[in-house]
Image (cartoon, helix red, strand yellow):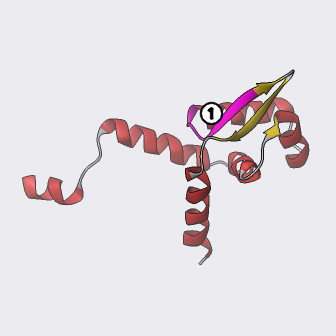
Amino acid sequence: MTEKNSYFNLPSDEEVDKMVELFKAFGDKTRYRIISMLAGRKLTVNEIADQLEVSQPAISHQLAVLKNAGLVIGNRQGQYVVYQLADQHIITILEQARAHRLN
């Protein structure tokens, strides 16, 4: 039994919880589109809502989920909050997922 556990390198419960939260965040069409839109640019809630033709409150809710998952950050600029991806790793995750599913 010890040999099996060392072979599989089982993750801790904390790691599993974080990874599940991450993949759940990617698992919604609107959130996936938001993440894709934020790759390489910063946008406000209204800009995202306009492009996706989704209500501003619905986009705000999805951005809150993405923030809680550590995928996006928001910075206040005057009366607006401008959102961007939290870091470059998210673009790498997108690219790897696309390569896996589209090839």
Residue at mark 1? 67
Q: Position of residue 97 (x, y in %)?
A: 57, 63
Q: Is residue 52 above or below residue 64?
A: below
Disc 1 crowd, CA 10 A, few/some/many (<14, 14-19, 20+): some
Placement of the N terminus among the 4 image quadrants = bottom left
First to last magenta residue range: 68-75
Q: Residue furthest bottom?
A: 103
Q: Position of residue 4 (x, y in %)?
A: 14, 58
In the rendered structure, the answer to whether residue 33 lies left or right of residue 87 reads right
Q: Count the labels in the image.
A: 1
Q: Is residue 39 above or below residue 60?
A: below
At 61% across and 59% down in the image, what residue appears?
94
Q: Is residue 87 above or below residue 101?
A: above
Which secondary structure, mark 1?
Answer: helix
At 55% across and 65% down in the image, what residue appears?
96
In the rendered structure, the answer to whether residue 72 lies left or right of residue 8 reads right
User: Is residue 69 in the magenta section?
Assistant: yes
Placement of the C terminus among the 4 image quadrants = bottom right
In the rendered structure, the answer to whether residue 30 lies left or right of residue 79 reads left
